[in-house]
Amino acid sequence: MNTILEHMTGLQTLTDDVIAMDFLMNAKSSVRNYAMAVTECTTPEIKKILMKQLDEAIDSHEKISIYMMQRGLYHPYHIPVQIQIDLKNIQTAMNIPT
């Protein structure tokens, strides 16, 4: 992030954490949406396309999750730790000037 922007927003340390978590949440949403779309489609051609997109969304989610776990940003197997990280990210997001 731009240094001037970091100082203006006060997000020097958590910006990457917040961005990564947002990216992960969007990936999860994509997986859900594609899965729902697959169950609603009416033609085999469209279903095949949506299944490919679903597979890619699942792969993306996995890569993002691994990236975050390796950097200590995501703890899906240690819920109390993850809750504290989530609360910290929420507080950071609430402190962004509007």
Image (cartoon, grey):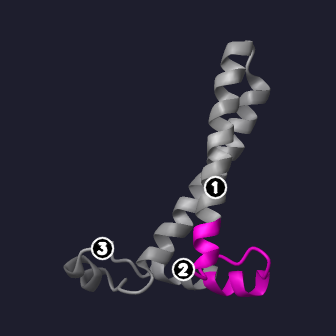
Q: What type is the residue that disc 1 sits on?
A: His
Q: Residue at x 38, y 77 (%)?
A: 96
Q: Are marks 2 and 3 in contact (CB under 8 Å)?
A: no
N-term mark: 2 or 3: 3
Q: Which residue is tagged 3?
A: 1
**Foreground pick, 95 / 37:** 37
x and y, in percent, of residue 52 in the image: 65, 32
In this picture, residue 48 sits left or right of residue 64? right
N-term mark: 1 or 3: 3
Queried whether the magenta region covers residue 76, the answer comes back as yes
Q: Which residue is tagged 2?
A: 89
The C terminus - image quarter: bottom left
Q: Residue at x 26, y 86 (%)?
A: 7
Q: Secondary structure at mark 3?
A: loop
Q: What type is the residue that disc 2 sits on?
A: Asn
Mark whose residue sits in front, 2 or 1:
1
Queried whether the magenta region covers residue 36, the answer comes back as no
Circle 3: is it few (<14), some (14-19), or many (20+) Cα within 10 Å? few
Q: Which mark is residue 61?
A: 1
Residue range in magenta is 66-85
Circle 2: is it few (<14), some (14-19), or many (20+) Cα within 10 Å? some
